[in-house]
Image: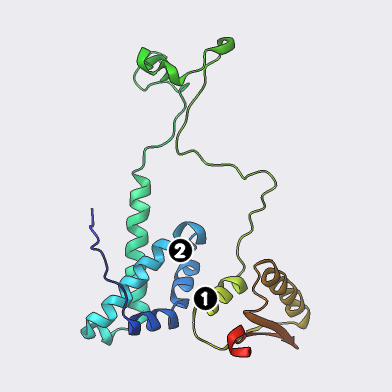
């Protein structure tokens, strides 16, 4: 199993470089069709490793930084996927123990572990671990749009503005409505402005309140 050494904190130059090229993380997750919530943190760790390597080893500058970052992120994600594959699977106490004549896992519970079963009304309580959790009641889970992912990357960077271009004006109008709704729900109306011109949507970073004052 590969052992990763603890990385030292980023220097100011490394931090600026990481922010400027953060879009590489979003590109990697989308290109490899990874779940954003499951693998973003893992990919970022690989990305930061690539940043450190880029500054510590000038000899690799004959390759593009994107290639170095992709290899590092792929290594971290691959390691995480192998680790998850080794996790003990969830099983029911009613499942039959392999190689037995109908003996279930519930039948193997010892007297010391009877506190984990419920004998009320003649029923057993089944305990399972690491199960797939259902959605919470009245909780709506929405996947992030490409626009939202790009805006989040824009907000942590230092660029002053950005532009989304669509094939039609109608599509641009629909996307602008969604962007403004998300901006309002997340309380970001004082952070950036979003407006449309023809089939393009423009995102403009707003000055801080103290700068406006």
Quick one: 152 or 75, which is closer to the camera? Answer: 152
Q: Mark 1 points at which residue?
A: 153
**Distance CA(mark 1)–CA(mark 2):** 12 Å
Please give the label number shown on residue 40: 2
- Secondary structure, mark 2, is helix
Quick one: 145 or 181, which is closer to the camera? Answer: 181
Give the x, y percent position of residue 136: 63, 44
Give the x, y percent position of residue 30: 50, 68
Can residue 64 be seen by looking at this rendering?
Answer: no
Name the image quarter holding residue 123.
top right
Quick one: 59 or 167, which is closer to the camera? Answer: 59
Up the image or down, 66 lies above or below 184; here it is: below
First in sequence: mark 1 vs mark 2: 2
Residue at x-position 45% and y-position 39%: 130
- Secondary structure, mark 1, is helix
Neighbour class for label 1 at 10 Å: few (<14), some, many (≥20)?
Answer: many
Neighbour class for label 2 at 10 Å: few (<14), some, many (≥20)?
Answer: some
Residue at x-position 38% and y-position 48%: 84
In the image, 25: left or right of 54?
Answer: right
Residue at x-position 38% and y-position 21%: 97
Quick one: 98 or 134, which is closer to the camera? Answer: 134
Give the x, y percent position of residue 55: 27, 82
In the image, 161: left or right of 13?
Answer: right
Q: Which residue lies furthest to the top in this view?
A: 122
In the image, 20: left or right of 188?
Answer: left
Residue at x-position 45% and y-position 63%: 40
Name the image quarter holding residue 171.
bottom right
């Amino acid at each position: 199993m590969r052992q990763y050494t603890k990385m030292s904190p980023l220097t100011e130059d490394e931090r600026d470089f990481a922010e400027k090229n953060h879009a590489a993380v979003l590109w990697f997750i989308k290109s490899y069709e990874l779940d954003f919530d499951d693998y973003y943190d893992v990919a970022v760790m690989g990305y930061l490793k690539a940043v450190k390597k880029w500054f510590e080893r000038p000899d690799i500058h004959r390759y593009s930084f994107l290639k170095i970052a992709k290899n590092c992120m792929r290594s971290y994600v691959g390691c995480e996927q192998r680790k998850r594959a080794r996790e003990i699977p969830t099983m029911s106490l009613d499942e039959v123990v392999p190689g037995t004549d109908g003996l279930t896992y519930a039948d193997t519970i010892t007297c010391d572990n009877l506190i984990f079963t419920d004998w009320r009304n003649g029923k057993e309580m089944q305990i399972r671990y690491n199960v797939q959790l259902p959605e919470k009641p009245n909780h709506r889970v929405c996947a992030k749009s490409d626009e939202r992912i790009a805006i989040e990357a824009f907000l942590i960077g230092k660029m002053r503005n950005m532009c989304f271009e669509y094939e039609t004006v109608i599509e641009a109008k629909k996307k602008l409505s969604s962007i403004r709704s998300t901006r309002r729900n997340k309380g970001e109306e004082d952070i950036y402005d979003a407006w449309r011109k023809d089939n393009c949507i423009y995102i403009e970073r707003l000055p801080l309140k103290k700068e406006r004052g």
